[in-house]
Image: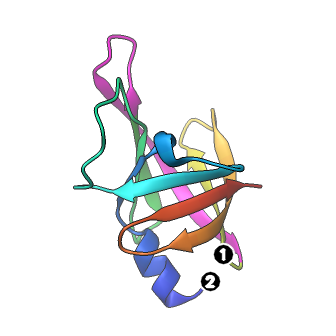
Amino acid sequence: MEARTLQCLRRSWGHSREEDSAGVEVWRPAGYPFPLARGRNWFELREDGSATFFGPGPDDRSSATLGFWTVTGDDEFELRHSDNALSLRLKIVECSGSVLRLRQR
């Protein structure tokens, strides 16, 4: 994976599900003016390979789960919750300062 793509990934991303289409998920960086929604999933990827996942909890307050991310190939990476309850392999369709488009593998 290119260094530029790695740098692009290392930030907080919120799922802009309103923009999803044709099997591609759209994620926007922190600070993006999302429309109002009842709960939104987020993940934060850090340089050391650690990750934090945020999502609505049972009472609609955000809850955090720790995890990890690893590069698995050209423009591909895997997200794993630390308890191994969830593992996703993702293909990067686009990554820029304003959008991250992902396809599940």
Circle on res. 1: 2
Q: Residues within 10 Å of mark 2 (few under 14, many from 20)?
A: few
Residue 43 in percent (x, y) is at 42, 49
Question: Residues at badges 1 and 2 in contact (C-beta under 8 Å)?
Answer: yes
Of 91 and 1, nearer the camera is 91
Q: Along the horizontal axis of the image, is 105 left or right of 64?
A: right
Up/down of 31 relative to 62, above or below: below
Residue 91: quarter of image: bottom right
Q: Secondary structure at mark 2?
A: loop
Mark 1–mark 2 Cα distance, whole angstroms, equals 6 Å
Residue 7: name its quadrant. bottom left
Mark 1 surroundings: few (<14), some (14-19) or many (≥20) residues within 10 A: some
* Left or right of 7, for residue 95: right
Q: What residue is shown with label 1?
A: 75
Q: Amino acid at mark 2?
A: Met
**Residue 104 or 98: which is nearer the viewer?**
98
The residue range painted magenta reads 55-73
Q: Residue furthest top?
A: 59
Q: Residue 104, position in %: x, y?
A: 71, 52
Q: Residue at x 28, y 21 (%)?
A: 61
Identified at 77% across, 55% down, the residue is 105
